[in-house]
Image: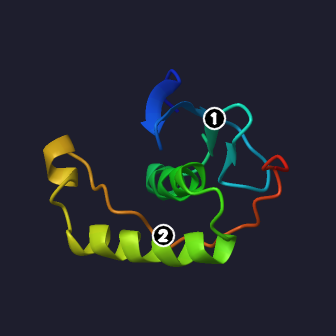
Amino acid sequence: MQRRKPIRVTIAGNEWTVRRARLKRVYGYCDHAKREIVIDAATAPDIQWQTLIHEAMHASAPDLSEDAILRIEADIVAVLRGCGDWFGAARGTDARPSNRPRQPNTQSPAK
């Protein structure tokens, strides 16, 4: 596994940190208090990519329910999957996310 440094991104006008770490029982989580998104480093890159989309939506719209996030995520993933290798070809990799099972976000801190 290649080590990557945390990155800083702007979501909904706020600066957030995105990093990868070994997680148990979840693919990732969004910590609003720390403005941090953590993605499980042990999963395949396509799962990390899809998880980042999911957690970025939590960061951007914290009032949305998990069901709403999952519906929007499914639509976004379907659109990106429909684009085929448009974006992956530019990076030299297949950027399409996989169909992965969802796990409850048990590590996310309470609001």
Q: In the image, 62: left or right of 87? A: right
The residue lying at 71 percent from left, 31 percent from top is 34
Q: Amino acid at mark 1?
A: Glu
Find disc 2 in the rendering and name its residue: 73
Q: Nearer the viewer, residue 57 or 92?
A: 57
Give how far apart the Cα atoms at labels 2 and 1 are. 19 Å
Q: Position of residue 44 (x, y in %)?
A: 51, 52
Disc 1 crowd, CA 10 A, few/some/many (<14, 14-19, 20+):
many
Q: Quadrant of residue 83?
A: bottom left
Indicate the colouring scheme: rainbow
x and y, in percent, of residue 11 in the image: 47, 41
- In the picture as drawn, the residue positioned furthest to the top comes out as 5
Identified at 53% across, 51% down, the residue is: 60
Q: Nearer the viewer, residue 11 or 30?
A: 11
Against 24, residue 65 (above or below) is below
Q: In the picture provided, is 10 more to the left or to the right than 26?
A: left
From the image, tell me which residue sits under label 1. Answer: 36
